[in-house]
Every structure is written in structure tokens, then in C-alpha cells.
Image (cartoon, grey):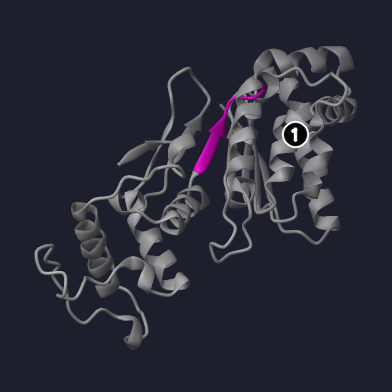
Amino acid sequence: MTKELALVIGSTENSYGVHQQQLQATTNFIVGLDIPEPFKLSSVQTFDRDNPDKPKPETLMCLPYDVRYIILERTIPAQNIRAYLKRERVGIELPAIARADSTQLRRECLLVALDSCTMEVHSGPGNARLQKWLAKVDFSGVGTSCETGFDAIISLLFPYFSYFPYGGEGIMKNNDVGLAVACRNLRTMGLQFYRSSLEEIAHECMGDFELAATRIRAYYQLDHLLGAKQLRELRFFAYGRDYALQGLREVVIWFQKGFESKSQRVTVDIIIL
């Protein structure tokens, strides 16, 4: 089921059918998991609305948090969420149980979804809108160290990275690198450069590739990425002729040395498109 990103937390819909689906999903996934015996559901109880004294079915929320997380992880597919790339609303696919009348369960479903997705973001205004939404997402009390949506993001991709004007004062807090640093559990990041952006810098530097790398790092404020402590993979996607790409190759080398000096294992490479 696809729900609008900004409305997932606020959903309050509940029904008898939802509870039945919740029980069925819980039972099916527990069977295939290595879960300690006391936490397994040995039988499926039925619920009769006309007979309130009859036992109610077991629900997902009666299980320990770690077990619920495993179940939801198997239920919610990994997704590539293209947030704010176009005018259309962007949804995130969640299972039917996310619509049950439990704020805690909805938060856990959203946490698992964000924790397994790649968030593809439009630089500039789209970035600012996403940051505004992530700041409002509340994961307090969910059972992890995550507090807001920023903490749940582990993968970011910026397909228009070099198109964004980075020259202004104080722009760090709303640019793509600023978002990456704000996501303290970020593991992978992709930045796309376009031909005109790289060729302009290469022309200005007249074949001095180290100077070109310094200007690329400074203009796009890339040095701040060394502060992404959980980062494991940094990829630069690029269009352009070979001479224009040399400066970006020097940037890759600079990052490799920088992360190595911090004893941080990060794969840094460039992919030519």
C-alpha cells in the first residue's frame, strides 16, 4: 500500500480487516525466522465481534521490538524513493499493518522503510522541503537511537548535484552536503556532475588538475563530507570529456587519503555516464 510521505505518521484508519491482516502477516513471517521459542505464535486465534469474551488474536505489538523489526524488515520492500524530483506527490510503500490504530507501529514501519531505501533528492528547493519533513518525523520511543527522520536515512542520491548554485553565504545548511552531514547514520551517497559544470572549471584551471580539484571541493563544499562518520561508500557520477574529468578524479584521490587518515573505510570512486 502506498501512502503519501508526509501523511504516513498521521494515518489513523483502523478496521477489523486490518487486524486480521496484521495477524496473518505476523504469523507468516515468524514461521520462517530464527526466533526464540517463547516468542513464537503456536496457533492462530480467531476473533468474533459477536462474542467479546472470546480471546482476541495475537498482534505484532505483543512481540519484542527486535522481533518486530525483523518481521517488518522482511515485509517492507527496499525502495528507491524519488523525493521532490517532480511536481507529483511521492509515496512510500508500506504494508497494510501500517494503517492499524497504533502510532508506535506506524513509526516502526516508517523507520524500517527509510532505513532500507535510497532517497533520491532534487537539490535546492526539493532538498529544503525534504529536510523540513525529516525534522518533523518523530522516532522517539521506537526502540533505537533514532530521534528524527534524519537519523533513519542511510542512503542518499543527488541526480542534479552540480546544477545547484553553491556560491551564496550561509547556504551550507540547505545544500546537499549539509543534508548528508545531518543524516548521522548515512552509509552511501551519490553525487552527479554534469558536463558543463566540470568543463567550466577545467577551462578556468587550464590543465592544472590539482587546482581544478581544489576548486571543485571548495565550490561544492565537499570537504564537509569528511564529517560523515558512518559513511561507507561515496560515488561521483559524471558526464564529460576526459580532460574535464581529471579534476574530479583528483577529488576522489583526495577523499581516499582523507578517509584513510581518519581510519575510516570508505569506498570512493567515479562512474562515467
Q: Considering only vertical position in the picture, is 208 above or below 232?
A: above
Whether 157 is drawn above or below 202: the answer is: below
Q: Which residue is mark 1?
A: 249
Q: Count of labels shown?
A: 1
- Disc 1 on helix, strand or loop? helix
Magenta part of the chain: 118-124
Instruction: Say whether residue 180 is left or right of residue 9.
Output: right
Residue 61 visible in the snapshot? yes
Q: Name the residue located 79 percent from the left edge and 52 percent from the top edge.
A: 259
Point out the residue furthest to the bottom here.
37
Name the residue rendered at 40%, 59% in the picture. 73
Disc 1 packing (10 Å; few <14; some 14–19; many ≥20): some
Q: Amino acid at mark 1?
A: Arg
The x, y position of residue 125, in whole percent, is: 64, 21
| Left or right position of 158 against 213 | left
**Which quarter shows the N terminus?**
top left
Quadrant position of residue 237:
top right
From this viewpoint, is residue 241 visible?
A: no
Asked whether 175 or 20 is in front, the reply is: 20
Q: Position of residue 72 (x, y in %)?
A: 38, 60
- The picture quadrant where one finds residue 68 is bottom left
Q: Position of residue 63 (x, y in %)?
A: 38, 74
Residue closest to the eye, 209 or 54: 54
Quarter holding the C terminus is top right
Of residues 40 and 51, the one drawn nearer to the viewer in this rendering: 51
Residue closer to the observer: 186 or 268: 186
Within the magenta stretch, is there residue 46? no
* In the image, residue 8 above or below residue 22: above
Q: Residue at x 51, y 42 (%)?
A: 118
192 in relation to 182, above or below: above
Q: Residue 90 occupies which quadrant of the picture?
A: top left
